[in-house]
Image: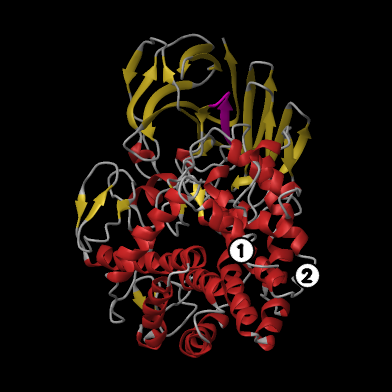
Amino acid sequence: MDYFSDLDLTKKLCQPGEKYYSMINKMDEEVTEFACNFKDDSSKMSEWGHNYFCEQDGGRLIFDLNKPHSHVCEICGKEYKSKTLDNVWVYFYRNTAIVTLLKSAALYNIRGEERYLDYIKKILSFYADHYEEFVIHAKDKIVKDLTYDVGGGARIMPQALNEAIMLVRIINALEMVKDKIGEDFLDRVNKELFIPATKLLEVQLIRIHNIPCWINSALGMIGLFTKNEELLDRIFHGEFGIRNQLKKGVTEDGFWYEGSIHYNFFLLEGVTNLLLFTKLYDYDFGKEENIVKKMFISAYYYAFDNDVLPNPNDGWPNVNLKTYSYIYNTATKIFGEDSEVGNLLKNIENGKLERGIIPLSRPYYFDNKIPLERLIFNPNLNLDNAKPIKRKSNNYPSSYYGILRNNKINVFYKYGHKGPSHAHPDKMNIEVMVGNSILTRDLSNAGYASRLCNQWHRMSVSHNTVVVDGKNHVSSAGGKVLKFTDTSLHATSENVYDGVDYTRKIDILPAGFKDEFDVNSSDIHTYDWFFHSQAKLLSELKYEKAELGFTENGYQHIQDIKRVITDNDSVVLKWDLNGKIIKSEIDTKDKEIYIAKTYDNPASLLRTSIILREKNNNSTFRIIWTLD
């Protein structure tokens, strides 16, 4: 297998008037400007990208190559200045440098101009020649203990994870030019960069986790590229090597155990690059290749019908299948355009959604439409012969979530966890899609160091679930399915809090869904049932201003709280969801009902939230949603 699937065809499609002409011209402008002005300093320490978010609304700050000391929120425009943010800017700058290597290598193959090789040598020589001058650190701390932080220690980048991503991209760039850039240069990069980086990273393979998967991928690619058989043996056969990571870390349903769709794809990015290189170098990846393939297939069927991705646990908001089309392009290179994975890619590319952008470790896309992987691996992908795919209701019992769907409504339901890593305290949370409109969603989160991530996004109250006594859920255990059909998913979870059990029954209807949530305990508690709606509330109700009585665990961010004044045992609310009229019939017997405003993501937007409260030992919350 060659790295470029058809280099002659790619060259042809980059000529004036052809579909990639504008893309490579833009790439040329970008790499020329960056490489000609490239300047870095090994005394500068990079810091964690998760710091690069607005304190007010959670929006990412704008990385401006020309403004290393000015960091402006992309949403509200607030400017921030700090040493920490300057160091995060260094991380983004170095990531841009590494992506420049990839673009330069592709351009060299397409245009054949020696200056692109010179750009690669200029940038990569700096990082290789000075690698051991960079201080070993984890995020913002200089460390000797490489296990000080789960992200690990690194030199050029802020943590081992980012160092591994950097190495994966460097190897891809060098693979494209290895026959032209010179053996002496490659030997120098191996001696000065790859060997010490391997020594730094390999000792950090100490757990089953997404970060060791990236480390394994990077070191496995180094082993293949430099023909280091001993390293390959350790990476593929070690206790925390790539085969064991996949065997132990991927559920039977085909999802990474940490329960985040972003981390599912993020991990796949690294692993799929390693799998590609085993094909290029004729090395046996092992039967775990089938696990990788299943992960791509399962993720497609997990999505809502419009390709928006349900988003439990840590990750990024507003992601859809196009967000990760670059990874599907690499997988299609491996499995073939006519494979099941290739057909999934064609359907994804034919989708009508605009691609959702992730804020960190961004791959290269032209105009947010064409990834570099498409240009190199699938330059003439035939989207016209995509075979239609019909998704159906699915339950994923080893991953603790499922999705119900008909032609009008999709309901995603998360009823358990596989452990605490990257988990949000959101047992029994649901997300609902009505046609192509989101009725309610999981906000995922802003950067991990941001105020709103830790005060709102990772709190139980920001999810569609029941909160007990104003505190977060404490359980990170799994759940149990009581019933699953094409139209029903009923599940239970014990000891969500000590001595408090949950059962939620979701049944989709021809034009709506029924939601019944049982909470059971031997003790009396305050139960708050939350539903956060993206729709506009139309109903005019009689209200009084109110407080909920809790001031932490996210409650401090609930705004404009109003208690609905009613003596009825039920309340019907009318909503406008992008022109669709929806009604919610809510059982209010023995309950108080509140309407409030809560943060969306970003927090510059607000949602309308329904809160039902009952003080009891056992309580049942019932609501029926119907489309007019």
Instruction: Decide if residue 191 is on the left or right side of residue 291.
Output: left
User: Would residue 517 be visible to someone looking at this image?
Assistant: no
Mark 1–mark 2 CB contact (< 8 Å): no
User: Would residue 319 be visible to someone looking at this image?
Assistant: yes
User: What residue lies at 31% left-to-right and 43% top-to-bottom?
Assistant: 57
Secondary structure state at the residue bearing disc 2: loop
Q: Residue 68 got which mark? A: none
Instruction: Decide if residue 569 is on the left or right side of residue 597.
Output: right
Residue type for callout 2:
Gly
How many numbered circles are shown? 2
Secondary structure state at the residue bearing disc 1: loop
Q: Position of residue 539 (x, y in %)?
A: 42, 11
Which residue range is magenta in the image? 430-436
Q: 418 or 276: nearer the eye?
A: 276
Dot 1 crowding, Cα within 10 Å, few <14, some 14–19, many 20+: some
Tell me: residue 455, above or below residue 101. above
Q: Is residue 299 magenta?
A: no
Q: Is residue 435 magenta?
A: yes
Q: Residue 4 got which mark? A: 1
Q: Quadrant of the C terminus?
A: top right
Q: CA distance from mark 1 to mark 2?
A: 24 Å
Q: Position of residue 567 (x, y in %)?
A: 46, 9
Q: Position of residue 194 (x, y in %)?
A: 51, 84
Q: 591 or 562: nearer the eye?
A: 562
Q: Earlier in the sequence, mark 1 or mark 2?
A: 1
Residue tagged 2: 286
Residue type for callout 1:
Phe
Q: Position of residue 164 (x, y in %)?
A: 51, 72
User: What residue lies at 38% left-to-right and 68% top-to-bottom?
Assistant: 97
Q: Nearer the viewer, mark 1 or mark 2?
A: 1
Dot 2 crowding, Cα within 10 Å, few <14, some 14–19, many 20+: few
